Image (cartoon, rainbow, N blue to C red):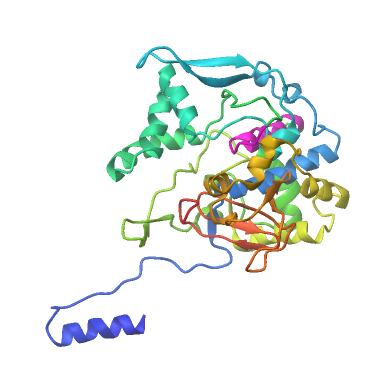
Amino acid sequence: MQALEEKFERATTTGKLPGTVLAAASRDVSSDTTFCLASATKLVTSVAAMQVVERGLVDLDDDITKFLPEWKHPQILVGFGGEEHREKPVLVPAQNRITLRQLLSHTSGIASLDDEKLMKYYTVLGDSRGTVLLRYFMNNDPEIKAKALEEVRQVMGSLSVEPLFFEPGTSWKYGQSTDWAGQIVERVTNMTLEQYCQENIFKRLGMTHTTYRLLDNPHVAANLIQMTSRGPEGTVQPAESVYPIDPKVDKGGSNLYTSGADFLKLLSSLLRNDGKLLRPETTDLMFNYSLPKTEEFRYFRTNPEHLKDNFGDLAPIGMEVDHCLAGIVNQRDLLGGRKAGSITWQGATRCYWVLPIVLPSQLISTDN
């Protein structure tokens, strides 16, 4: 900063500039600065789900329709038929039932809202969500994205039954599965996810700067850091968050706000397996689950393009992964110190954790 000030001082002294005022707009970051976790939220929901399993309120292999009757007749989107501009989605009934284990391991077939195929499905049906999502996620024009922002926040803050992309349990796909796991926690406890997690996770660990409901917690909202993105020249610039601060539901997959200090308390407790949140054997079950050893899942574990598209630099070239009930597990030692068996996840806001390290930022896009 001193060198920059000296350059401006010389410029004004020599007359190159008539005068300057330097002002810093960004606030300092502290251990209590509030970050939007985006998909890094999922770890908390996995813990909550394993708690209700531990209490006998649900089994990992229960049919979720016991708790979520809206999923009683899931359908699989196999493609689109009909003439151009008159396409219709081709749907077939799913034969397998969805389980909580599949929700936590992303093997349910439920997709993400920004998946191109799902956006096309909405658009073909004439559902306004398709237009809104396409306008925002598939457009690089900042003016168009800005106009669509408030509408896309409304979509991102809601949750509804979508078509599946494959038979439950037969493949892997990132999506809204953890949101539905959070809904199971709500249904079996008769509490909102915010209420449940405050009582059974955050208070137990002294996480006083963590919430799904930012507007209801002004001390957390007051410390919220500015979202950023990379501009055309690669510079970091202020940006608007696509995640709503007043979602219609507490989304277990994306809508948690926390501080670095708070999230580290969660990771530390899980790493020590100290019994504050889960019995040691339940923590082991959550972290030691492995996907089936089929050809379909081999693609998930080893395909470089698939790994890069889904996990960015968390899955460098040559890495092999598995998926437990809380994140991805790397299968070999990596340069830089990450050991085989380490568990990790990240969010679109570039908040990512690797047990035992948490590194938060607010830089949108998983490939930054």
The magenta stretch spans residue 178: yes
Give the image quarter of residue 351: bottom right
Q: Is residue 166 above or below residue 31?
A: above
Residue 190 relative to residue 237: left or right: right
Question: What is the count of numbered marks?
Answer: 0
Q: Left or right: 163 with respect to 338?
A: left
Residue 133 visible from this viewpoint: yes
Residue 63 lies, in percent from the top left, at 76, 24
Q: Nearer the viewer, residue 360 or 166?
A: 166
x 35%, y 70%: residue: 24
Q: From the image, give the main secondary structure of the stretch colored magenta.
A: helix
Residue under the image location 71 percent in, 26 percent down:
98
**Image: 327 above or below 219:** above
On the image, which quarter does residue 147 sit in?
A: top left
Span highlighted in magenta in the image: 171-188
Decide which of 135, 180 is in the foreground and name it. 135
Where 117 sits versus 262, above or below? above
Name the quadrant containing residue 353: bottom right
Residue 145 x/y as whole percent: 34, 41
Task: Tell which of 128 and 125 is nearer to you.
Answer: 125
Q: Is residue 266 left or right of residue 78?
A: right
Name above or below for residue 274 compared with residue 194: below
Residue 211 belongs to the span the image colors magenta:
no
User: Does the image show residue 192?
Assistant: no
Residue 356, given in percent of the width and then of the height, sits at 70, 63
304 or 59, which lies in front? Answer: 304
Rendering coords of residue 86 (x, y %): 37, 13
Quarter of the image with the N terminus in it: bottom left
